[in-house]
Every structure is written in structure tokens, then in C-alpha cells.
């Protein structure tokens, strides 16, 4: 069957995006300037980049991808020489059997497709990407490969300690490599960057939407210079490799302020570095955006707007507890109240709120900071985390003397928090008198809206839904696309259970009842378990049952 090769000018003309007069002018300029027709039309302002992409996407059925969301393996990049990638403005995305998926700004550039097919020996399947994104991606992937090779050459010609010295220069290969690792993490929305030394390699791993993935593998001899550069950026002791160190980096990336917390840990293969990425431009500040159901949100608002008492947010590390606390503080932040926090660390700075950083070196612990805060005439106190009985008791007694206290606790469920406080040595009468509300939460991955599809639930899913009283005929899942990196998920949302401490429950706490008895009473009086809250959100198409089960099955 003969392949009909359409011309981009005809497509744009048929779509009504340009006039025949504009096309003829552009064709004339194309011969003079020796540029692609699409580039001429863009440079003359006849069309926009978005119009160009939409015409190609809808007229030809060629999918559009956003490159900054794509995970491209180095072995795929190595298939196409840098010279060809730069010459044609293309970048390979992945190999599927004998097919190479190639991102192009002009998928009708058949000369480029033929040349790349001959160079790689693979059949080329084009997808559309914007020209600006392609330029950045080529610079990112091929540029980083070039700097890695430069570092290796330098390491062979000089001692690694000498190579560390010039890393303050912006054009140093080490500086470029570390900066690119951080920039790519921010573009992908990663919460953490892991620099993992192994016996035969150095792994760069990102945690995206709560899931770890290996982004890049480097030669093991690069470990020392990469770690040294990170230490210099965080003002840490470069020579000290035997003990853990903590530091902080502030950067401006793509017009966004990013705060990065650095933690080093000596391992048998060298220092492991974890960088926690805090994107200050993406802080949630409204309770309405936390994903609480109407029932749970009403209970939570009632608790945080009380004049006094303790409100606890519980869950494992990385479950969004701090975000929930900050959202509550933002709502309570008014001119007529005095809000003071004690945190370790202060993750986000809130305007109008006095925030205190724990400093163990100087002896400023949670307990000591909390005592001092109570002498500062506060209305509302936020304690970053209750870690010991001393902090817990001071916080609870502060609530009994007319303060509203917000804090976090590491427990598996809302009900478990009561027993946890008792195990820490807090008297039951103090818990019963002071605690108003306990919120437990987890983060689940959100179904990608770009590739979402409906399906009929299987018997096991229907049984699980029926057991929790959730009725649904269709469920939704992401089939995987360029937007979500073929995972079917993009972003995260929280699932919750909110335990309101009523008079009956206070009486049960005084009598030291079991967790099961607390739970039975709570269920009878309207507590929506976290599993059910997640299943309701799965039924609404926000997430999937497997994702809910992943984060709640151990509870």
C-alpha cells in the first residue's frame, strides 16, 4: 500500500489556521532562509506553537507528548548520535520491539525520519513535541552525557580531590551535572533525590508520587565529585565522610524558589545523599484542596476552629501531615490571633506566623521550645511532631489552659493514637480532657486524567466495595500515556479518617478501653474508615482500588 505523504502547509491551510497568501509568502521565505516551513510560519507569527501541534495531532492522529514528564533511559539516548539529534531537532523516547518512538517538532519531516531509520536500524514512529521542549531535552540528555564523559576524562588525568576544587565555577562539568540532576527532579515533581553508591555504579533515583524509580546510572568513580559538589552547595564539611551531616540549599529553578534539605549517610560503598525537594511555589494553603470529604472536612474544621484543645494529624513519614497542618494554620492565620510553631525543620515559611526551628546542638528541643512558646502569649501553637512523653504532656497541658494545639504523631490509624499517647506515659484523664480530634491520612496516586478509561470491576473489587458499602457500576484507571510516564497515575491526593472525641469516648479513655472498643464506638457514631474513604474516591475516578489497597492493607 502506498504511503500518502502530506505536506504541513496543506494541512494548516485545510484547517483554516493560515491563508493561502500567508502560505505562499512563507514558502518564498523558506527558500531564502533555508528553514523548515513550520519554523518560518512560527517566526512570522502566522501560527502559534500550540496551533501547529493541534493541527498535526488532530489532522494526522499523531500523539502529542510533554517531554519534561518523560523518563528516557540512557541506553535509548545512546541509539541516536548527538549530531543527528541536534541537526533534526529530535530525541528518542523509547524502543518498542523493532520500533523507535521519536519525539519531533515536525513529524512530516520524512527526510529526518528516513535518515534516523537508517542510522538506528529501527522503524521510526513519530510523536509531536514542542520545539522549545526538544531543545531543552537535547541539551539535558546529551549535554549531561557530555559532562559525564568530561568528568571521567578529568578523573583519569588528575586526582579527585583536585577536581573538587573548581566546582564553584558555573561552567564546571560537575556543577552542570549536579544542577541538571536537581532541575530534572523539579520538572518531574520529585519529592526526593537519592544519590546511591553501589559497588559497580552510582544510581540517581527520584521519588515521584511516592514511588521510587532509578532515573540514571553513572560510573562509580563519579561518586566522590558528585557528593562533594552537593556538600559545597549545602555548606557541609567536604572532608568529613565518616559521620552523617545535614544541610540546606536554596535555588531558583524555572522562576520557582526551591528549598532542598540535604542528608548524608556513610555506607559501605561511600556516602549516600538524600535531597528532600520542597517546591515553595506548590504549597497547599487551603483546606478545601486537601481532598477531605464533606463529612470529614466539617469535623476537621470544627476541631481547628475551637478555642482550645489538641488536634492531631497521624500517619507514616511522607503521608502529607505537615501539608495538612500548614493548611489549617493558613486558615487560622488572622490579625487578632498569635500563632507560634516549633518545627524540625521549618519546611515552609508562612507570612504572619512566628516559626521556631528546633536546634539540638544548642539544646532547643521540641519540649524546651514549647515551654518558651507558652510564655509568649500564644493563642494557637503548632508542634511539628510529638516524639516523646515530655513534649506530649506539655502540649496537652497547654491545651487544658486555653490554647489550641496542632501537632503530628506517628501511628497507623486515628484510634491507635489514643493507646500511643497512653504508652508514652500520658495519663488517660489528660488525653480525655484535652484531645478534640485525631485525623489519620495517607497519600495515594491520582488517576491520570489524560489516559483515564472506564472498566467493569472484577468480582474481587465488587466484593471489596460491597463490604464497605460503596456501590458502583464502573471504575476508572489510567492506561498509561506520555503525560504520566506510562504509569497511569499523575499527582497524589490524600485519603483520611477523622475521629471526633465525644463524651462517651472520653469516658472510655478514662477507663483504658481497648483499641477495638474505641473503634467499634467510632464506627457506630459516623467514623468513615480510611479504606472506605479511599474506595469512595476510587468510585469517583480519582484513584484506583489497587492504589488504596497498597497504602491501607497493612492497617
Image (cartoon, rainbow, N blue to C red):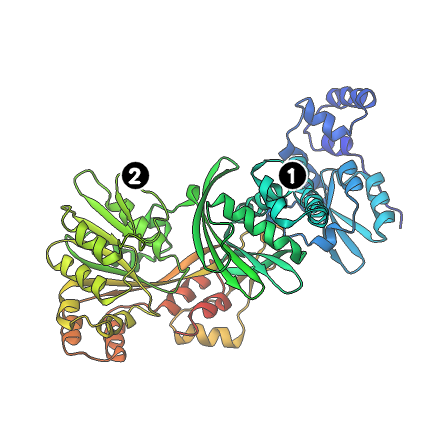
Quick check: 204 left or right of 357?
A: right
Q: Name the residue under label 2.
A: 351
Q: Name the residue under label 1.
A: 136
Picture quadrant where residue 554 is located: bottom left
Question: Within 10 Å of the Cα at label 2, are there few (<14), some (14-19), or many (20+) other Cα atoms?
Answer: few
Outermost residue on the left side: it is 401
Q: Which residue sits at x=35%, y=70%?
A: 412
Q: Is mark 1 on a helix, strand or loop?
A: helix
On screen, 215 above or below 39?
below
* Of residues 347 and 125, the one drawn nearer to the viewer in this rendering: 347
Quick check: 388 left or right of 464?
A: left
Please report whichever mark, 2 or 1, sits nearer to the chain's N-terminal start. Answer: 1
Q: How many marks?
A: 2
On screen, 171 above or below 443?
above
Does any portion of residue 259 appear in the rendered image? no
Q: Which residue sits at x=33%, y=69%?
A: 411
* Of residues 58 and 225, the one drawn nearer to the viewer in this rendering: 225
Residue 162 - label? none
Question: How far from the left and from the top, in percent, is residue 488?
Answer: 57, 58
On screen, 132 above or below 433?
above
Picture quadrant where residue 163 is located: top right
Picture quadrant where residue 429 is located: bottom left
Question: How far from the left and from the top, in percent, is residue 199?
Answer: 64, 65
Quick check: 392 left or right of 248?
A: left
The C terminus is located in which quarter?
bottom left
* Of residues 90 and 295, the one drawn nearer to the viewer in this rendering: 90
What whole-number distance in Å separates the C-alpha atoms at marks 2 and 1?
Answer: 35 Å
Question: How far from the left and from the top, in percent, is residue 52?
Answer: 68, 34
Does any portion of residue 170 appear in the rendered image? yes
Amino acid at each position: 500500500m502506498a504511503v500518502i505523504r502530506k505536506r504541513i502547509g496543506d494541512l494548516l491551510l485545510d484547517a483554516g489556521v493560515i491563508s493561502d497568501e500567508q502560505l505562499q509568502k512563507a514558502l518564498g521565505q523558506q527558500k531564502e532562509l533555508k528553514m523548515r516551513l513550520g519554523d518560518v510560519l512560527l517566526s512570522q507569527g502566522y501560527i502559534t506553537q500550540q496551533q501547529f501541534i493541534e493541527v498535526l495531532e488532530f489532522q494526522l492522529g499523531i500523539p502529542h507528548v510533554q517531554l519534561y514528564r518523560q523518563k528516557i533511559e540512557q541506553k535509548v539516548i545512546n541509539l541516536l548520535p548527538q549530531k543527528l539529534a541536534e541537526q533534526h531537532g529530535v530525541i528518542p523516547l523509547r524502543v518498542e520491539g523493532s520500533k523507535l518512538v521519536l519525539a519531533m517538532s515536525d513529524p512530516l519531516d520524512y527526510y529526518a525520519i528516513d535518515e534516523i531509520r537508517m542510522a538506528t536500524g529501527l522503524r521510526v514512529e513519530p510523536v509531536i513535541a514542542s520545539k522549545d521542549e526538544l531543545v531543552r531535552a537535547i541539551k539535558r540528555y546529551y549535554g549531561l552525557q557530555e559532562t559525564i564523559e568530561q568528568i571521567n576524562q578529568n578523573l583519569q588525568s588528575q586526582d579527585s580531590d583536585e577536581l573538587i576544587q573548581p566546582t564553584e565555577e558555573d561552567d564546571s562539568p560537575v556543577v552542570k551535572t549536579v544542577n541538571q540532576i536537581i532541575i530534572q527532579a523539579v520538572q518531574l515533581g520529585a519529592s526526593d533525590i537519592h544519590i546511591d553508591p553501589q559497588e559497580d555504579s552510582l544510581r540517581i533515583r527520584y521519588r515521584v508520587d511516592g514511588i521510587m524509580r532509578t532515573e540514571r546510572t553513572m560510573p562509580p568513580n563519579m561518586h566522590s565529585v558528585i557528593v562533594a559538589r552537593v556538600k559545597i552547595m549545602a555548606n557541609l564539611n567536604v572532608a568529613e565522610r565518616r559521620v552523617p551531616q545535614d544541610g540546606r540549599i536554596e535555588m531558583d529553578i524555572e522562576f520557582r524558589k526551591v528549598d532542598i534539605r540535604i542528608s548524608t549517610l556513610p555506607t559501605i560503598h561511600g556516602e549516600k545523599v538524600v535531597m528532600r525537594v520542597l517546591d515553595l511555589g506548590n504549597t497547599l494553603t487551603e483546606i478545601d484542596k486537601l481532598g477531605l470529604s464533606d463529612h470529614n472536612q466539617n469535623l476537621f474544621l470544627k476541631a481547628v476552629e475551637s478555642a482550645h484543645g489538641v488536634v492531631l494529624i497521624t500517619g507514616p513519614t511522607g503521608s502529607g501531615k505537615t501539608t495538612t497542618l500548614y493548611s489549617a494554620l493558613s486558615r487560622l492565620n488572622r490579625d487578632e490571633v498569635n500563632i507560634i510553631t516549633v518545627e524540625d525543620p521549618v519546611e515552609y515559611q508562612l507570612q504572619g506566623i512566628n516559626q521556631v526551628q528546633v536546634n539540638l546542638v544548642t539544646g532547643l528541643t521540641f519540649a524546651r521550645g514549647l515551654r518558651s512558646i507558652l510564655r509568649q502569649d500564644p493563642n494557637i501553637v503548632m508542634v511539628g511532631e510529638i516524639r516523646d512523653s515530655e513534649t506530649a504532656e506539655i502540649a496537652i497541658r497547654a491545651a487544658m489552659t486555653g490554647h489550641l494545639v496542632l501537632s503530628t504523631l506517628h501511628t497507623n490509624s486515628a484510634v491507635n493514637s489514643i493507646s500511643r499517647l497512653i504508652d508514652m506515659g500520658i495519663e488517660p484523664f489528660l488525653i480525655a480532657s484535652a484531645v478534640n480530634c485525631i485525623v489519620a491520612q495517607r497519600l495515594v496516586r491520582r488517576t491520570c486524567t489524560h489516559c483515564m478509561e472506564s472498566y467493569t470491576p472484577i468480582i474481587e473489587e465488587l466484593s471489596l466495595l460491597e463490604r464497605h458499602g460503596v456501590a458502583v457500576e464502573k471504575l476508572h484507571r489510567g492506561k498509561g500515556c506520555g503525560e504520566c510516564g506510562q504509569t497511569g497515575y499523575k499527582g497524589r491526593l490524600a485519603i483520611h479518617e477523622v475521629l471526633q472525641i465525644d463524651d462517651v469516648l472520653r469516658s472510655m479513655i478514662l477507663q483504658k478501653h481497648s483499641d477495638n472498643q474505641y473503634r467499634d464506638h467510632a464506627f457506630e457514631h459516623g467514623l468513615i474508615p480510611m479504606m472506605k474513604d479511599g474506595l469512595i474516591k476510587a468510585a469517583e475516578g480519582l484513584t484506583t482500588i489497587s492504589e488504596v489497597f497498597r497504602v491501607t492493607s497493612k492497617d
